[in-house]
Image (cartoon, rainbow, N blue to C red):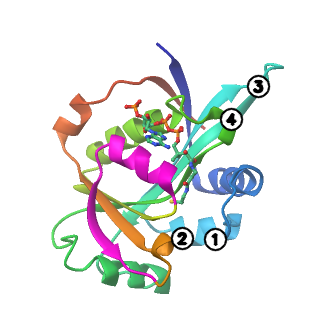
Amino acid sequence: MPHYHLREYPLQQGALEIAYIEEFFNEFPKRKTANDIISRLQDREFQILMAEAPLEDGTVVPVSYKVSHELRADETDPALVDLVQRLQGSVAFSGRRILYNWLGATRRDWRGQGHFRALTEEQEVWAVSRGFDEMVVKTKNRYYDMRGALDTLQFNVIKLEASPDVMDAKVYLSKPLGLSVLDAHRSRRQVTRA
Ligand SMILES: CC(C)(COP(=O)(O)OP(=O)(O)OC[C@H]1O[C@@H](n2cnc3c(N)ncnc32)[C@H](O)[C@@H]1OP(=O)(O)O)[C@@H](O)C(=O)NCCC(=O)NCCS
């Protein structure tokens, strides 16, 4: 059974790492800079997690990452105000703690090896320990790999937002959190806190 090596980062160092990783292994447009990441995450609860694995020459590199943060009903950042509005009627905010899965991907040659499951399971342990009630994530129809992974990780579709191109329709998913979620975990992992 594989053993996953995960690392949890503080804000500054984590923002630099994520910006670097998005630069060279995320094939998607709209990559985030370190400043984007810092301004989004400062003043709120967040988690920056990465999975590491050795290259052929033995060098250990990040191969998968996940960035999540608290999402509140009273956001002031325009992008988050917009997100909260779109979630109205699909997610209950009152008296509950919502964790938003903001960024995440696995480097192409390392996909399908369980790194994203290991990150998600570790994230769930953290989220439950911090009292979060629900995890929310947004993707698009066109991202079949992400949709497949979220399906397997037992996220529920809570909203579909149509678009002129059906491939661009936005899919909102969520997973209720609680101790029972942790019972389904199966990755063997070790976490280093940088
Ligand atoms: C989605 C993504 C993060 C999955 O990462 P990964 O490290 O390959 O995922 P894992 O190997 O941990 O797989 C987790 C589970 O999802 C399943 N899964 C992963 N990719 C899948 C796919 N393409 N189709 C169906 N199921 C899939 C796996 O079988 C696994 O289930 P299991 O543990 O029961 O076997 C990766 O494919 C990726 O980075 N894709 C590009 C990112 C992206 O689409 N971004 C869009 C913006 S939201």
| Residue drawn at the location 35% of the way across and 66% of the way down | 172
Q: Residues within 10 Å of mark 3 (few under 14, many from 20)?
A: few
Q: Is residue 54 left or right of residue 144?
A: right
Q: Earlier in the sequence, mark 3 or mark 4?
A: 3
Q: CA distance from mark 4 to mark 1?
A: 27 Å
Q: Is residue 82 left or right of residue 173?
A: right
The residues colored magenta run: 143-163
Q: Earlier in the sequence, mark 4 or mark 2?
A: 2
Q: Quadrant of residue 98?
A: bottom left
Q: Amino acid at mark 1?
A: Asp
The yes-or-no answer for disc 3 within 8 Å of ligand 1 is no
Give the numbered dot on residue 109: 4
Q: CA distance from mark 2 to mark 1?
A: 6 Å
Q: Can you give x and y, in whole percent of width and height, for residue 19 in the image?
A: 70, 58
Q: Tell whether label 2 touches label 3 (CB within 8 Å).
A: no
- Of circles 4 and 2, the one toward us is 4
Give the numbered dot on residue 36: 1
- Where disc 2 sits, the SS reads helix
Q: CA distance from mark 3 to mark 2?
A: 32 Å
Give the numbered dot on residue 55: 3
- Where disc 3 sits, the SS reads loop
| Residue drawn at the location 34% of the way across and 24% of the way down | 186
Q: In the picture, which quadrant includes the C terminus?
A: top right
Q: Would you place residue 52 above or below residue 135 in this image?
A: above
Q: Can you give x and y, in whole percent of width and height, for residue 28 in the image?
A: 66, 62
Q: Amino acid at mark 3?
A: Leu
Q: Determine which residue is flagged by label 2.
A: 40
- Please, which residue is most extreme toward the top here? 1
Q: Tell whether label 1 touches label 2 (CB within 8 Å).
A: yes
